[in-house]
Image (cartoon, grey):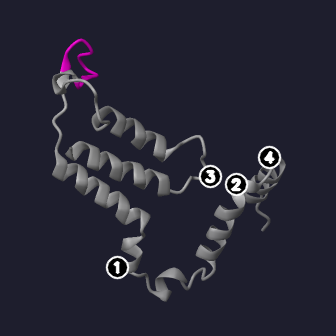
Amino acid sequence: MAKSIVYKHYQRLLTQWPVDLLRPEVSFQKAIQRRIDTRLKPSTTAPEDNVVFNQAQATVPTKVAFDEKGELEQVNVLYSFLENRYTKTYPLSEKMMRPASNPNYYDGLLKELNEAPTRSWFQSMVIRWKGSLRFS
């Protein structure tokens, strides 16, 4: 019963998790989905049949102990990232976000991160060349 509740929490969390537009081939959702499928997916077999093979000793199956409290803590941490709790709890000062040496640095970084996924190969190469050439 407890496993299915934790499993549903993970499923809800993964449906809300944003997709990484910079690296679509690396999916956090798929990694977590594999983990919860092997550890938490509701099983129709007997509990003794739920075993995971040890990578070091592939022939010896080891039972995975279910720790409900630990799993719920991990779900809570993922929800805290999803809800941006840390930026609300510990807001950054204006001085931190606009350093005197380069006050527009973070604005430019956000602009770059938003534009990068939609660039063509040629545009990316031009920007790369611009970054490597320095005129003094």
Q: Which residues are magenta?
A: 50-61
Q: Left or right: 131 with respect to 98?
A: right
State yes or no: residue 58 in magenta.
yes
Kindly indicate whether the residue at mark 1 contacts the one at mark 4 (C-beta within 8 angstroms): no
Give the foreground label among 4 and 1: 1
* Disc 4/disc 1 C-alpha distance (Å): 40 Å
Name the foreground residue: 132 vs 49. 49
Prevailing SS of the magenta stretch: loop
| Residue located at (41% from left, 75% from top) | 87
Q: Position of residue 36 (x, y in %)?
A: 34, 39
* Disc 1/disc 2 C-alpha distance (Å): 30 Å
Q: Residues within 10 Å of mark 2 (few under 14, many from 20)?
A: some
Looking at the rendered structure, the kind of residue marked 2 is Pro
Q: Above or below — where is 124 with respect to 136?
A: above
Name the foreground residue: 16 vs 99. 16
Residue under label 4, please give it. Answer: 121
| Residue located at (28% from left, 30% from top) | 43
* Disc 2/disc 3 C-alpha distance (Å): 6 Å
Kindly indicate whether the residue at mark 3 contacts the one at mark 4 (C-beta within 8 angstroms): no
Of the image marks 4 and 1, the number of the one nearer the N terminus: 1
Of the image marks 1 and 2, the number of the one nearer the N terminus: 1
Q: Position of residue 136 (x, y in %)?
A: 78, 68
Residue under label 1, please give it. Answer: 89
* Disc 1/disc 3 C-alpha distance (Å): 27 Å
Residue under label 2, please give it. Answer: 117
Give the foreground label among 2 and 4: 2
Kindly indicate whether the residue at mark 3 contacts the one at mark 2 (C-beta within 8 angstroms): yes
Looking at the rendered structure, the kind of residue marked 3 is Leu
* Disc 4/disc 3 C-alpha distance (Å): 14 Å
Residue under label 3, please give it. Answer: 22
Looking at the rendered structure, the kind of residue marked 1 is Thr
Q: Residues within 10 Å of mark 1 (few under 14, many from 20)?
A: few
